[in-house]
Image (cartoon, helix red, strand yellow):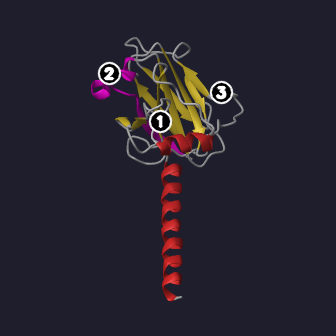
Amino acid sequence: MRPLIDIAIAIVIAAGIGLSTAWLAVERGNIFGLVRIGDWTASPEAGSPGADPYAVARLARTGELPLGAGEGLAFTVSVDADGDPLAGNCTYHIDGQTPAARLWTLTAYDQDGRLMANAAQRQGFHSREILRRTDGSFDIVVSPDVQPGNWLPIAGAERFKLVLRLYDTPLTTGTPADSTMPDVRREQCR
């Protein structure tokens, strides 16, 4: 009888460890095949048949529709240039240029991946409506307070993330090593 109890305990422990590590891998998001440019990360395989099983499980859980390999690439950032998490009570400057793309969008999401409701009814920018400097660079202010120029309002989130989607970009077929992404600098917090 004792060997059967030992086997049952071993099975329960193994199942608990297996299920908890699988849950952790799905909860943390894409962990294989990530492309990193500065603080921005992307998973080029997420929308392809070659996606790892954890990415597929995360997409099934969240209901996200990733960009296909021929459509573009979505980069995410959840920390500023100093490595601190993006906080909803702070003002940030997204400054610089994006890699080559026919069109890009920048959108703010809360921790759960939902668009943030705000009084201005603006959840993002796209490359054709942005005010640019003469050298083609831009400065987008992400803040809970009204700002002049390119202002992306955030509200009601303790933490948030920014998603920069590059449509029809050569990064889907090339190497991003020599590409640059805009910097995310914190200015002040309430």
- Under mark 2, the amino acid is Gly
For numbered disc 2, what is the local secondary structure?
A: loop
Q: Does label 2 or label 3 sit earlier along the sequence?
A: 3
Q: Is residue 57 above or below residue 42?
A: below
For residue 94, side relative to residue 38 (left or right): right
User: In the image, which is nearer the foreground, mark 3 or mark 1?
Assistant: 1
Residue situated in front as seen by the camera: 108 or 142: 108
The residues tagged by marks 2 and 3 sit, at their Cα atoms, a distance apart of 33 Å
Q: Is residue 188 magenta?
A: yes
Please state which of the two labelled residues, at mark 2 or mark 3, is closer to the viewer: 2
111 displayed left or right of 69? right
Q: Which mark is residue 76?
A: 1
The residue type indicated by label 1 comes to Thr
Whether residues under marks 2 and 3 lie with C-beta atoms below 8 angstroms apart, the answer is: no
Report the magenta residues as a range: 170-189
Q: Nearer the viewer, mark 1 or mark 2?
A: 2
- Which residue type carries mark 3? Arg
Q: Position of residue 41 (x, y in %)?
A: 41, 36
- The earlier-in-sequence mark between 3 and 1 is 1
Crowding at label 2, few (<14), some or many (≥20) Cα neighbours within 10 Å? Answer: few
Residue 190: give x, y in percent of width and height: 57, 47
Residue 122 — which label?
Answer: 3
Q: Gap between marks 1 and 2, in whole Å?
A: 19 Å
Q: Secondary structure at mark 1?
A: strand
> Mark on residue 174?
2
Task: Estimate how packed mark 3 is, as few (under 14), some (14 to 19) or many (20 or more) residues with alpha carbons within 10 Å.
Answer: some
Mark 3: which secondary structure?
A: loop
Can residue 147 be spotted in the picture? no
